[in-house]
């Protein structure tokens, strides 16, 4: 589907940001990559393995309408460069619904990536584990999700003819990309599983009762992001890969500092996937 037939929230924010980026570079990324809490080091890993040329880094605050993230562990920078001979856009941090922003801004990374020319989104995030068999420190490839954020990411989006964004989300997460990511992680001996991501609005963590509810609903992990970006990307016709890192068991005592500390060990795994998958984007 051509861009003039795709749905949009109609706020014009992504278009202004894309124009500002175009003032600095004509690079057209094949994929957008979002690095969640504490996962910024993944860039170094991917760069050391397959980087080339001279990358460009832009602070979010220098882009019109792009609010700087307020969450520790989110650097708030857009990295544009070449990994494995393929141009990519890597967002060091995301905008969360729980920060008080409208839902369209929680999907701004996907909207910008699409505007720059990307056809794929790689969404990484730190999560709490719901499955007792999934230990802290393991990776999860997202196969499906539960949206429990209290609103749909496409609320207010419309097609050019004014009709609502009735988008098929029966296959949000790309099967081929998910299979490839699983194989890469397993080949490198990284503990990885696959499952369902439950998205909560946050910012508070889950109570034990909420954790049990999510588990009974079929969720494998729980987090406060990914879903807005994934659904928006799907609405824009993009392929989506979801990568989650289990920092703790959901429902128990946890602090954001603990999440950041645990997330640092996941940066290598995510960097490996980005470096080795770029050829398929």
Image (cartoon, rainbow, N blue to C red):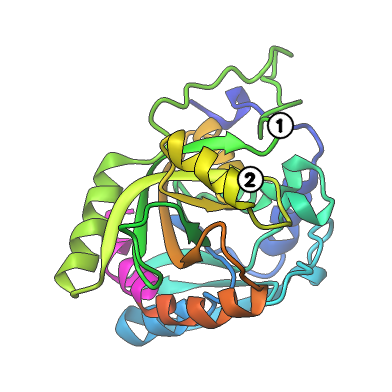
Query: Residue 276 at x, y = what percent?
Result: 26, 68
Please check the rendered image and state whether residue 88 is part of the magenta-colored stretch, yes or no. no
Considering only vertical position in the picture, is 90 above or below 214?
Answer: below
Percent coordinates x, y for residue 91 in the rendering: 59, 66
Among numbered discs 2 and 1, the one appearing first in the sequence: 1
Q: Which residue is mark 2?
A: 200
Q: Residue at x 31, y 74 (%)?
A: 272
129 versus 220 height, above or below: below
User: What residue range appears in magenta?
Assistant: 269-281
Residue drawn where x is 70% and y is 72% of the image: 76
Q: Main secondary structure of the magenta part?
A: helix
Say whether residue 221 is left or right of residue 12.
Answer: left
Residue extending furthest toward the left: 187
Q: Which residue is mark 1?
A: 151
Label 1: how many Cα within 10 Å (few below 14, some 14–19, many 20+): few
230 w.r.t. 122: above or below: above
**Percent x, y of residue 178:** 29, 49
Residue 194: x and y, percent? 30, 50
């Amino acid at each position: 589907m051509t861009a003039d037939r795709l749905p949009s929230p109609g706020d014009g924010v992504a278009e202004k940001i894309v124009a500002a980026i175009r003032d600095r570079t004509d690079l057209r990324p094949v994929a957008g990559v979002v690095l969640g809490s504490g996962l910024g080091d993944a860039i170094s890993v991917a760069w050391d393995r397959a980087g080339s040329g001279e990358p460009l880094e832009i602070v979010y605050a220098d882009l019109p309408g792009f609010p700087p993230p307020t969450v520790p562990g989110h650097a708030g920078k857009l990295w544009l460069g070449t990994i494995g001979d393929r141009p990519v856009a890597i967002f060091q941090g995301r905008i969360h619904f729980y920060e008080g922003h409208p839902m369209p801004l929680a999907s701004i990374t996907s909207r910008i990536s699409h505007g720059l020319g990307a056809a794929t989104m790689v969404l990484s995030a730190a999560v709490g584990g719901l499955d007792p068999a999934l230990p802290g420190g393991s990776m999860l490839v997202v196969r499906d999700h539960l949206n429990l954020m209290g609103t749909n990411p496409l609320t207010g989006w419309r097609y050019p003819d004014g009709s609502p964004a009735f988008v098929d989300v029966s296959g949000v997460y790309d099967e081929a990309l998910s299979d490839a990511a699983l194989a890469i992680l397993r080949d490198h001996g990284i503990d990885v599983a696959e499952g369902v991501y439950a998205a909560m609005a946050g910012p508070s963590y889950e109570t034990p009762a909420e954790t049990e509810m999510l588990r009974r609903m079929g969720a494998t992990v729980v987090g406060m992001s990914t879903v807005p970006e994934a659904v928006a990307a799907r609405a824009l016709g993009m392929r989506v890969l979801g990568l989650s890192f289990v920092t703790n068991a959901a429902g128990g005592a946890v602090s954001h500092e603990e999440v950041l500390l645990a997330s640092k060990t996941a940066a290598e795994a995510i960097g490996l996937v980005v470096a080795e998958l770029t050829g398929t984007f």
